[in-house]
Amino acid sequence: MRLANVGGRATILANGGGIDVQRSSNGWFSSSPQALYEKWDAFRVFANTLNPAMATPIDEATLRSPVPAPRQVFAIGLNYRAHAEESGMEIPRIPATFTKFPASLAGPFDPVERPGNTMDWEVELVAIIGNRADRASAADAWGHIAGLAVGQDFSERTVQRAAGAQFSLGKSFRGFGPIGPCLVTPDEFTDPGNLELGCRVNGEVMQHSRTNDLIFSIPALIEQLSAVLPLLPGDVIFTGTPAGVGAARKPPRFLQVGDVVESWIEGIGTIRNNVIAPAG
């Protein structure tokens, strides 16, 4: 199943179009994409009863984040071996976890303000929780995942590295967490743990890897994070970025106003964000 947020309404993608969840369920399920995660198992059963022929055309420009208001947003640093190496850092023994504050999340095609001179790109596979995970085992982890999406962990490196390298503010400027273009359930993939992903800036490939280079896989992250605190329905996990970020280049390269950042993941799709000048 592919679940999208079309103009603020939960929509199942099918046949090149979409099926509105609230209308097709006669109001049994909410139009809010975020509300569906609280009833995820029941929603999956309902979704499987729908006829793809019910789909009507949708406009890509109306797509928003499939998880617009999570309670918790986790992000993992240095989670690809090649990225740790290009950063000159040791391979971590436990996930290097920080947060992107929920108000920084954005839609898959939203413009993103450039708040400073060291704005960087980081394509990431995003995992979205469907069933509460509390002290979950890695063996059971996929049963807690609603689906996967493309994410872009934009970073303002100067702010990120200031004040004792507390990452969260430098990762949480307005629009710094676009997610989309839709959520894809794990059963849609031959192997959800081994997906190609990449990032282009103005058409030039900057990052290209596979998620089997993750140091901590999605099941390992679910186990380790849920050992500390419960993961709640609709929570988001940015799983880390591969090598090729701007800060690690020689010389460093950062985003400029007018740049177009495209991030893609095999079997999910592409998100596209234009870099714009800050308001005011």
Image (tube, rainbow, N blue to C red):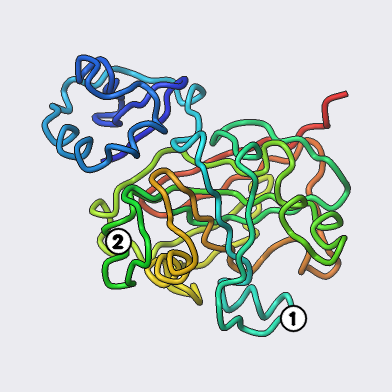
Report the amino acid beneath label 2.
Answer: Trp
Residue 58 vs 117, above or below: the answer is above
Nearest to the eye among marks 2 and 1: give it. Answer: 2
Query: Looking at the picture, how far across and down is residue 231, in whole percent?
Result: 43, 55
Query: Looking at the picture, how far across and down is residue 21, in whole percent?
Result: 27, 23
Query: What residue lies at 64% left-to-right and 36% top-to-bottom?
Result: 103
Closer to us: 163 or 57: 163
Query: Looking at the picture, how far across and down is residue 151, in whole percent?
Result: 54, 48
Closer to us: 144 or 188: 144
Closer to us: 42 or 52: 42
Q: Quadrant of the N terminus?
A: top left
Query: What residue lies at 20% left-to-right and 14% top-to-bottom?
Result: 26
* SS assignment at label 1: loop
Query: What residue lies at 52% left-to-right and 61% top-to-bottom?
Result: 239
Report the amino acid beneath label 1.
Answer: Gly
Query: What residue lies at 33% left-to-right and 38% top-to-bottom?
Result: 38
* SS assignment at label 2: helix
- Report the residue marked by disc 2: 142
Please rate how many residues cluster around mark 2, counting C-alpha atoms within 10 Å: few if below 14, some from 14 to 19, many from 20: many
Q: In the shown orientation, is residue 236 left or right of residue 134?
A: right
- Report the residue marked by disc 1: 88
Q: In the shown orientation, is residue 251 left or right of residue 201?
A: right
